[in-house]
Amino acid sequence: MTTRPLIVGLGGTVRAGSSTERALMVSLKAAEAAGAETRLFGGAFLARLPIFDPRPGATTSEQGELAEAIGAADGVIVASPGYHGSISGVVKNALDTLELTREAPQPYLEGKPVGTIITADGWQAAGTTLMALRAIIHALRGWPTPFGAALNAGTSLFDEAGDCREAKDAWQLATVADQVMDFARMRAAKTKDLA
């Protein structure tokens, strides 16, 4: 790639400083270290998005901003808490908002590598939530990366500086970023070869 790939991070909760958003930030930092430009749509932003309404009507500035950023992204990382065995409402609403792109030349998450991060208070919730998120990404025509991070938030995951307390968690978040970057670079090379 001659330019830095844009990796968009989407996720978190409405609670400031959530484990989910902190995990997403760690992964985005790993993408930056690998040469990416990153953009975060965290919990505060997601909380401002109106409930997606598929009927024709006005689009809010937040909805337009999200749709435009995802359209411009070379890769995406989605992070959700595990709420009752699935993704949170604010993350699902943000993904539903991508319906605004249905008429775009590259709608939804078409052809984009999408990394997945789940934080949950137990392994069962992490597993079912990861499966649900991957199914949604497929429905939106995205390419979930082979590895999805699942962090058990039943323990304290991050220190005061925002770094992972456990090396295994740091490895998971870096692996998600690395795979998104690898896929984004492969896609860029393919597009260049076809040009």
Image (spheres, rainbow, N blue to C red):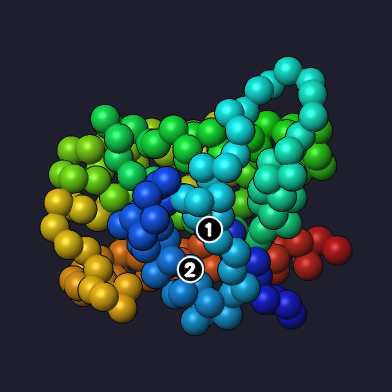
Q: x and y percent of residue 32 in the render?
A: 53, 77
Between marks 2 and 1, how big is the CA–CA gap? 7 Å
Q: Tell me the residue that label 2 is attached to.
A: 28
Q: Which residue lies at the image location 73% right of the left edge and 57% below the top edge?
A: 72
Q: Are marks 2 and 1 in contact (CB under 8 Å)?
A: yes
Q: In the image, is 140 to the left or to the right of 63?
A: left
Q: Which residue lies at the image location 86% right of the left edge and 63% below the top edge?
A: 195
Quadrant of the rendered image containing residue 49: top right
Q: Tell me the residue that label 1 is attached to.
A: 9
Name above or below for residue 22 compared with residue 34.
Answer: above
Q: Taking the image as drawn, is residue 103 in sight?
A: yes
Helix, strand or loop status at disc 2: helix
Q: Taking the image as drawn, is residue 138 in sight?
A: no
Which of the two discs, 2 and 1, labels the residue nearer the N terminus? 1
Q: Which residue lies at the image location 56% right of the left edge and 50% below the top edge?
A: 45
Name above or below for residue 2 compared with residue 42.
Answer: below
